[in-house]
Amino acid sequence: MKKSFLISALLLIPMLGFSQISDSLAQPLISIEKKSLLKNLNITFDMRTEFQAYTFRGWDRYYNGIQFENGFTALGFSAKLHDRVNFSFRNRFNKGSDIQTLDQLGSNIELAYLNIKASPKLDFIIGKTYAFYGGYEYEFKALEVLEYNDIQSNALAFVTGAGITYKPSRNHKFGFQILNSRTMLYDDIYGDVVAENIQEPDWPVAIVGNWRGSFFDGKIQTIYSLSYSNQVKNKGTYFFTLGNKYQNRNLTLMYDFNYSYEEVDTKGIVTDIMAGTSVAEDALYVENWLRAEYRFGAKFKGLLSLMTSSAYGDAASDRKHLRTSYGMVPTVYYSPFEKIDIRFFFAYIGRFYTYSNYAIQEFDTAYHNRNEVRLGIIAPLLLL
């Protein structure tokens, strides 16, 4: 009897183990037997590699540099999981991977969201996504932009939250989002460098609304947005952008106007100028950005980006002007291949910084500039 029981137990144990192992394996979304589903999967690899030669002149900066740089390297996945469900994911490798204390993702994870189509006109988006800010400078992936204006180069674009888009007609689309206003807790960003009246809010939240319009068969387009975000308790940022675009067969013109009033300085430029012991308050940034693109033929395209950005301190009282920056980026693209988007480019980047008499006298600032030449390759590659 004991022998029979022992033999039965020995036979059952492997079966029980097999059952546990089988139950622990999740059913894969795409099995080998369902190769046809691969048509709903996109895998992208984006890269921009460039050779740079640059100079800094003015103030206490006087140096030159030459180097190769990986300006943008990212791997992305997107897939149609269901007739009404899509997901997108992008990992940018040349960003820090430290887990952020607020949204619990590395800053290298730019996108990780679901898009659920509730109806032909209404979509829901949830996860880590891009904020619905307006303007065409923001619309470009960082792969495509060699130099951002001051607001966009210091703005936090990818945060976690939820949103909806509503498209009542072919020419108009509206978006609304509720997001975290940052990815980290305030103390982790600034440490002890905070003003005495700064407190962490219950929810550092951002509310964003935008409108996309199209007129005259798409020749005139707009992306306008308005947002409010509270980085700290009872203090926030009011930001609006007016983005305008004209396009015909070979010429594209884009113009953005940006206005950001920040009760606590989130861009850091005013804080750096004042060089105080705490984060600046009542900062104001006003910007203009213009980009022209002209296609000379099947293989050549010319670009020119022009930008200005003015920074003000104590904006709530008398708006003391501190700094104006200017930028110009002429670029030439050469695309040798017909069936794959690989572009060689040559570009000059000029940035010039001037300061008001008030900033010079109070904060010991001075005019300076940066000049840079880049020769490189841009490759937004669709692998699958």
Image (cartoon, rainbow, N blue to C red):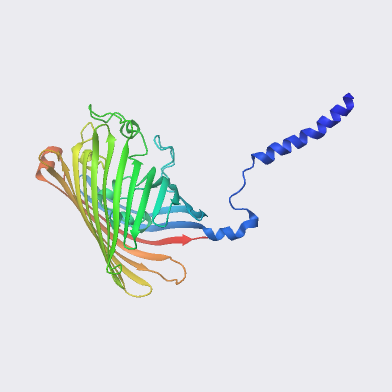
Q: Is residue 147 visible?
A: no
Q: Give the position of the N terminus as an image quadrant.
A: top right
Where residue 374 appears, x then y in whole percent?
33, 60
337 is higher (above) or lower (below) than 229? below
Where residue 268 appears, x then y in whole percent?
25, 41
Q: In the shown orientation, is residue 143 left or right of residue 2?
A: left
Q: Residue at x 57, y 58 (%)?
A: 37
Where residue 28 appears, x then y in whole percent?
61, 48
Q: Can residue 75 be seen in this view?
A: yes
Q: In the shown orientation, is residue 243 left or right of residue 104?
A: left
Task: Give residue 237's quadrant in the image.
Answer: top left
Where residue 187 appears, x then y in whole percent?
33, 30
Q: In the shown orientation, is residue 312 left or right of residue 133?
A: left
Q: How many labels does the image show?
A: 0
Viewer-closest of 243 and 361: 243
Q: Residue at x 84, y 31 (%)?
A: 8
Q: Residue at x 34, y 39 (%)?
A: 182
- Residue at the bottom extreme? 297
Viewer-closest of 261 and 150: 261
Viewer-closest of 111 and 175: 175
248 is higher (above) or lower (below) than 138? below
152 is higher (above) or lower (below) than 217? above
Viewer-closest of 252 and 213: 213
